[in-house]
Image (cartoon, grey):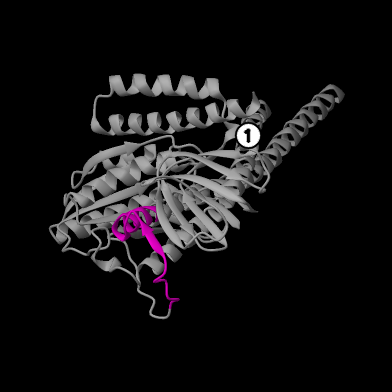
């Protein structure tokens, strides 16, 4: 039986671990709430961009715009969004699994692959893989990413798509369904998807300045940006929510461990007392004889 | 006339206004109630909003905006931009320092990504300083 001293020190160490995981859980919970709020806040932007595009589609052919034109995919760019830090449950490994699957599919179809990584864990993974070429790596994005961070990533992808270097751009990120459910997802951002809506109001009296082509450029860019931004925010919210759950489990496990160890320590102490009593009564017996 | 200023981080302004002056690709335009329906491309610059008809120029509110799209109908204006910083939130000294940092970044840029990033920052802070300048006139 382990000595009480040893058990005591183990309990102490597990207890301080529990304190840390508990704190991380609370931090992740509040960060998740904030990330969820900003996900909601960007919704009007996406909606307005979509409406403008619908109005534009009555005047000009949206589908022939370079950013909407589908091409045979020979080169593909993937934007992989993971976290900077670990201890977030299966968050990073789910992304890694999906990413590797996609790479294998590309390899089988003889599609050349390029990657932009977001988050340190994504770049650490991508440098170890030989099937892809990393063209940019972004790290330590702020908790509330704004247009500046978004544009850097978006422009890197857009210029390559327009130059014909890549024929499709996909984002691999974790979709935030609810605070209990998150799912690693792949989303095509370029060529952008847009369905013509046949019954829409007549917009022939609207003036477009400087011209429909320029306005379409602007709107298309905003819409694609909004989609990528949404993916970034979703990934953020998912990361914090998965970290929160992982840390809650860790805290629960630590509590169980402390209970077990405390029980063992009490048993050991009781054992020691019983043994001492037996020795004393044995000594008394010996004196009587 | 109803104005909606929509950015990636939410709706910044949702109010009735009298006049809005916005920088567009074809030059700055002022929009009053009853303006013809128009969709125009906004460029980075200062956006000025006059809430009531009698308000003086110095009572206008200013926003530093990044590029976007402006949609005008007879009764409403919708401005769709990535970012809009309210003039009151811009601290001039901070923007100056940030601009200097960005200029330094551009001169030291080693690759295309860094260079583009620096240019982006320079544009952004130049606009912010422009708006801060307008604000100063307002106060004095």
Along the line of sight, the residue nearer the viewer: B116 or A240? B116
In the image, is residue A192 part of the stretch drawn in magenta? Answer: no
Q: Considering depth in this image, is B128 or B29 the residue closer to the camera?
A: B29
**On what subunit does the disc labeled 1 rest?**
B
Residue extending farthest to the right is A288
| Residue B1 visible, this angle | yes
At a point 34% along the width and 43% down the height, the residue shown is A153
Vertical order, A158 against A53 (above or below) = above
* Residue nearer the viewer, B44 or A154: B44
**Residue A218 among magenta residues:** yes
Q: Residue furthest front?
A: B54
Please give left or right for residue B12 compared with residue A152 in the image: right
Rate crowding at label 1 as few (under 14), some (14 to 19) or many (20 or more) other CA atoms within 10 Å. some
Q: Position of residue A112 (x, y in %)?
A: 15, 52
Magenta residues? A200-222
Q: Which residue lies under the disc numbered 1?
A: B58
Residue B48 found in image quarter? top right
Residue A132 horizontal side relative to residue A19, left or right: left
Give the structural element (helix, strand or loop) at label 1.
Answer: helix
Res B108 quadrant in image: top left
Seen at 55% across and 30% down, the residue is: B134
Q: In this view, does A230 lie above or below A28?
A: below
């Amino acid at each position: 039986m382990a000595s009480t001293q040893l058990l005591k020190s183990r309990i102490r160490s597990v207890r301080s671990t529990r304190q840390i995981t508990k704190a991380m859980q609370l931090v992740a919970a509040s960060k998740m709430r904030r990330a969820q709020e900003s996900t909601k806040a960007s919704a009007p932007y996406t909606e307005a961009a979509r409406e403008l595009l619908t109005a534009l589609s009555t005047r000009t052919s949206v589908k022939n715009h370079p950013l909407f034109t589908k091409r045979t995919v020979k080169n593909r760019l993937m934007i992989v969004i993971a976290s900077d830090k670990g201890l977030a449950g299966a968050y990073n490994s789910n992304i890694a699994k999906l990413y590797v699957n996609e790479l294998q599919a590309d390899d089988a179809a003889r599609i050349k692959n390029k990657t932009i990584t977001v988050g340190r864990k994504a770049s650490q993974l991508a440098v170890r893989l030989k099937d892809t070429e990393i063209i940019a790596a972004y790290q330590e994005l702020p908790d509330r990413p704004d247009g500046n961070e978004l544009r850097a990533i978006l422009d890197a992808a857009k210029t390559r798509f327009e130059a014909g270097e890549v024929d499709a751009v996909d984002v691999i990120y974790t979709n935030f369904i609810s605070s209990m459910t998150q799912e690693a997802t792949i989303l095509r951002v370029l060529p952008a998807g847009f369905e013509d809506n046949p019954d829409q109001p007549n917009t022939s009296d609207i003036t477009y300045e400087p011209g429909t082509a320029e306005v379409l450029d602007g709107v298309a860019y905003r819409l694609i940006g909004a989609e990528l931004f949404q993916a970034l925010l979703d990934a953020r919210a998912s990361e914090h929510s998965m970290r929160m759950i992982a840390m809650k489990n860790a805290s629960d496990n630590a509590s169980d461990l402390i209970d077990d160890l405390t029980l063992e320590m009490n048993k050991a102490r009781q054992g020691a007392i019983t043994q001492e009593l037996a020795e004393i009564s044995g000594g008394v017996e010996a004196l009587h004889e | 006339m109803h104005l909606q200023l929509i950015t990636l981080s939410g709706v910044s302004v949702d109010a009735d206004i009298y006049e809005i002056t916005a920088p567009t690709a074809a030059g700055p335009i002022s929009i009053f109630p009853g303006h013809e329906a128009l969709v125009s491309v906004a460029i980075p610059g200062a956006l000025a909003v006059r809430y009531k008809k009698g308000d003086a120029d110095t009572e206008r509110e200013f926003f530093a905006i990044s590029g976007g799209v402006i949609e005008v109908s007879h009764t409403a204006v919708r401005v769709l931009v990535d970012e809009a910083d309210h003039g009151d939130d811009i601290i001039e000294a901070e923007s100056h320092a940030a601009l200097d940092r960005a200029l330094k970044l551009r001169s030291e840029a080693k690759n295309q990504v860094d260079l583009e990033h620096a240019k982006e920052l320079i544009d952004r802070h130049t606009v912010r300083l422009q708006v801060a300048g307008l604000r100063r006139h307002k106060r004095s």
